Structures are given as C-alpha cells and as structure tokens.
Amino acid sequence: MVVVDYFTKWIEAEPLACISGRHMIKFVWRNIMTRFGTPKNYSTEKHKGKPFQLDVWNRSMLPMEITVKTLRAANKDEESNVKDLRINLDILEEKREESSVRQTAYKQATERYYNQRVKEKAFKVGEYVLRKNEASRAQPQGKLGPTWEGPYRVTEANRSGAYVLETMEGRPIPRTWNARNLKKYFF
C-alpha cells in the first residue's frame, strides 16, 4: 500500500499480504489519521496491479492539537503556510542538487584514492606470463581446480594493456588478454 501527498511528495508505504477493506482501514488509521489527522480529500486507484494511492492533503487538525496549541495550530494562517511550504519545496530542490554535487565529488575523491594504490602491470614482449584459468575456461574449474595456467610468452603488447600470447611451443593463442588476467611467471 502506498500513500502519497501530491503537493509535498511525502510517501508512506507498507507491504500488505492481501489488500482488503479491513487492511486498508488499519493502514490508513495507523499511518495517516494518527500521524496527520483527517485528510480533507483523497482518491484511491487500482489500475493494472498498482497499489492503492491516497492523496493526503491535510488541512484538518486533531482535537489535541487545538487544545495543546502546537506550532502548527499557532501558525494556522493558510496563505502563509502554503507560501512557506512552496519556499521549502524550492529549497528542497536546491538541497538535492547540492547533495548530488557533493556525492559526485566524494565518488571522484574515492576513485582517485584507490587509483593511486593500483599497481600497473606491464609486460614486455618475450616475457613469460601465467593466465587466469577462469578467464580462459580451458581447464575444468572447481573448488580444487587450478587458478593459473601456462606459462605463455608475450608476443605483442598494445598501449591499451592488451597482450597477444603464444604457447611455449610457439602456437598463438587466438585472442588478446588484459593485464589483470595475467601475472608474471618466474622460472
């Protein structure tokens, strides 16, 4: 069940095992009436399996709010409340944009931090390397299967980090391999 205040875009949601009148009444009482008061108007929809949606534009107050004089009851000027709400919604968009910018900056800083610690593997033509078995899937893998296979000789090294390999007998391996799937072989 999903309830949306279309003006503020506030969402209340709860998973229900079955959607029945009794469950609807419980949900509305527990999540709407006790927290926000009685809605002035609402509409329900159920199209093509979508959950019920309830438009809760709350202009009524609970009796307790009138007697205790909450901040909402003290500032009950409708026009200024609507104006303030619109200002807050405008500020909300700015805050979301600021948050997005900060999040992007944080991701870039994290990427720089980890990229500083990456050791670039570079193999020269003629060096011997081992190839990851999971990359080639030449030998059956399993829990106790081999992790590396080879050795292979590097015959070409591209600037992009791709390598062409051949077996020790001189037979070429049909595709190019990335450096992360290779490691240096020492005799």
Image: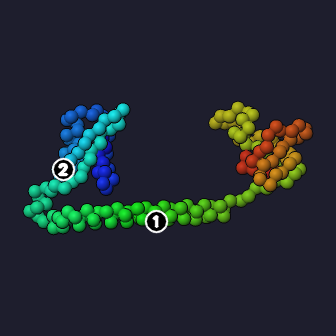
x then y, percent, for residue 162: 78, 49
x then y, percent, for residue 148: 74, 42
In the image, is 116 to the left or to the right of 185? left
- At 61% from the left and 64% from the top, the residue drawn is 113
Secondary structure of the residue carrying numbered label 2: loop
Look at the image and tell me whether residue 34 can be seen. no
Classify 9 as above or below 148: below
Q: Nearer the viewer, residue 109 or 36?
A: 36
Q: Amino acid at mark 2?
A: Lys
Residue annotated with mark 2: 40
In the image, is 100 to the left or to the right of 33? right
**Picture colour scheme:** rainbow
- At 20% from the left and 41% from the top, the residue drawn is 26
Q: Amino acid at mark 1?
A: Glu
Q: Nearer the viewer, residue 55 or 168?
A: 55
In the image, is 74 to the left or to the right of 49? left
Q: Return the disc, 2 or 1, that comes first in the chain's sequence.
A: 2
Packing grade of label 1 (10 A; few <14, some 14-19, many >=20) is few
Residue annotated with mark 1: 98
Q: Quadrant of residue 145?
A: top right
